[in-house]
Amino acid sequence: MQQRNVTTTQAHASCVALTPQEGLLILGASGTGKSSLALMMMALGATLISDDQTKLTVQSETGDIIASAPTSIQNMIEARGIGVLSAQTLDQCVIRAIVDLDVVEQERLPLVRKRRLLGRDIPLYHRSEGPYFAAALIQLLKGGRCA
């Protein structure tokens, strides 16, 4: 039997998805709102993959980065001021975009950015202060970016 070379790491990140093929990795330091953004996106139709810690694996056949939850935190999300909540989840998803909550977007129409993650370039977005941010990220996963 031939062994496959699999790259796996764990990130301090939350992750939500619309489908198993349309996932968003949410990065940021503690207290930047990873869980809050995930909860807002879940209210708009996304499904939780993981909260606060996300396992990332490169799929050997396609090179896609697959996100999943560590066993100890599956089906849970923290809601600050309320506690840890039960949540329906997907087992895994393909990461299609990354949002970094540590950096506030300064441009109205930012240039395309990428972040290198496990050897693959993934589209990168920064936090927007507008109330529409979660909805815009949902639409990004649904339809992509025009330019």
Image (spheres, rainbow, N blue to C red):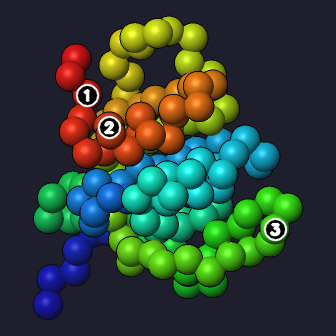
Q: Residue at x 55, y 77 (%)?
A: 87
Q: Is residue 116 above or below residue 90?
A: above
- Where is mark 2, residue-wise? 140
**Amino acid beneath label 2:** Leu
From the viewer's side, name the closer residue of 46 and 70: 46
From the viewer's side, name the closer residue of 49 and 5: 49
Q: Residues within 10 Å of mark 2 (few under 14, many from 20)?
A: some
Q: Is residue 101 above or below residue 141?
A: above
| Closer mark to the observer between disc 3 and disc 1 | 3
- Where is mark 1, residue-wise? 145
**Amino acid beneath label 3:** Ile
Q: Are marks 2 and 1 in contact (CB under 8 Å)?
A: yes
The alpha-carbon separation of the residues under discs 2 and 3 comes to: 29 Å
26 with respect to 60 (left or right):
right
Q: Residue at x 25, y 45 (%)?
A: 142
Q: Quadrant of the C terminus?
A: top left
Q: Are marks 3 and 1 in contact (CB under 8 Å)?
A: no
Which numbered disc covers residue 25? none
The spot of residue 73 in percent (x, y) is: 62, 78
The alpha-carbon separation of the residues under discs 3 and 1 comes to: 35 Å
Mark closer to the chain start, 2 or 3: 3
The spot of residue 139 in percent (x, y) is: 33, 39
Q: What is the secondary structure assignment of the residue under circle 2?
A: helix
**Amino acid beneath label 1:** Arg
Is residue 8 shown to the viewer in this render?
no
